[in-house]
Image (spheres, rainbow, N blue to C red):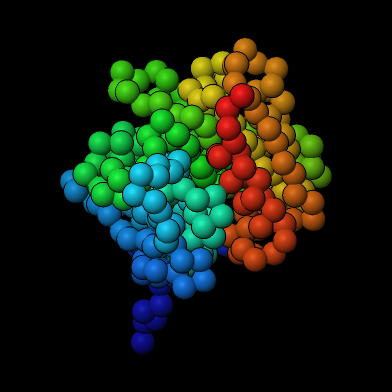
Amino acid sequence: MESTKKQVSLELLPWLVVHTDGTIERLAGTEVCPPGLDPETGVFSKDIIIEPKTGLSARIYRPFSIQTDQKLPLVLYFHGGAFLISSAAFPCYHTSLNKFVNLANVIAVSVNYRLAPEHPLPTAYEDSWTALKTIQAINEPWINDYADLDRLFLVGDSAGANISHHLAFQAKQSDETVKIKGIGMIHPYFWGTQPIGSEVKDEARKKMVDGWWEFVCPSKKGSDDPWINPFANGSPDLEGLGCERVMITVAEKDILNERGKMYYERLVKSKWRGKVEIMETKEKDHVFHIFEPDCDEAMEMVRRLALFINQVET
């Protein structure tokens, strides 16, 4: 009898496998949980549709207690997952956003952008741009009643931090009235063909990250495509970053650590006139806060991000 078991044509571990018949099997990030009242933090959440034509959706969060005349910062959040996996409804992200909203006292909108390879890049960037434009005009009571659109922040981890970077340029160049106060970049997913720092000795992880990017964005430029390398030929000058403040967080054991530090150093030396700060978490790896939300290091990182968003201008 001929075996009906599917054959694997490509393994993109630990995220997914591609079978010879073209079907995609995701190995992580597929779990979902419903919105609602979180009993631990008292944060409310619900799912909303941003763009009916494409099905683009988001999960919106608000603190339990808000004064009727109180306006809170609005945070547009972009989840990570190498553009391949996860969603706004992934339990780890839902837990993380509940804790963040409670501590930072903000309105947060976690964007459910479409994933590669079914929706090749730049779809994720286009969906995120649609969310940024639409969220300021959408007829949503939690935004209309409680959000301060003059304090709009973009926050993302890994691929989501990469998205935030690109949206900040697009906002400044656009004819649309989109004003971003600041961006919070958690363990940003930037890369490059030539290894730097710890990447030089960590050939296995360097090759692994190269493979992830080549899968979601096949091009002759490889890991020097401007989408993933902010300093490659064709990348916009950091002077054009369309926000007033930036916070970057990196993790000591993260293979992307050096890229986040390089971004900070280049931004400091550029002609951009905003304020930038960086935070490094020792002994932790990539997006540890998503999988260890209650550890001291995660709580400290979220606390620092909350201070960044709520700081009073001097």
Expressed as whole percent of the image width and height from the top left, the position of residue 251 reads 72, 48
Q: Residue at x 58, y 27 (%)?
A: 313
Expressed as whole percent of the image width and height from the top left, the position of residue 9 reads 47, 60
Expressed as whole percent of the image width and height from the top left, the position of residue 83 reads 46, 48
Q: Residue at x 63, y 58 (%)?
A: 289
Q: Is residue 187 above or below residue 34?
A: above
Expressed as whole percent of the image width and height from the top left, the position of residue 94 reads 46, 62
Classify residue 291 by image quadrant: bottom right
The quarter of the rendered structure image containing the C terminus is top right
Residue closer to the observer: 292 or 274: 274
Q: Residue at x 30, y 45 (%)?
A: 145
Residue at the extreme left:
53
Q: Is residue 225 above or below residue 156?
A: above
Residue closer to the observer: 218 or 312: 312
Q: Residue at x 39, y 37 (%)?
A: 148
Q: Is residue 182 above or below residue 295?
A: above
Q: Say if residue 129 shows up in the picture.
A: yes
The quarter of the rendered structure image containing the N terminus is bottom left
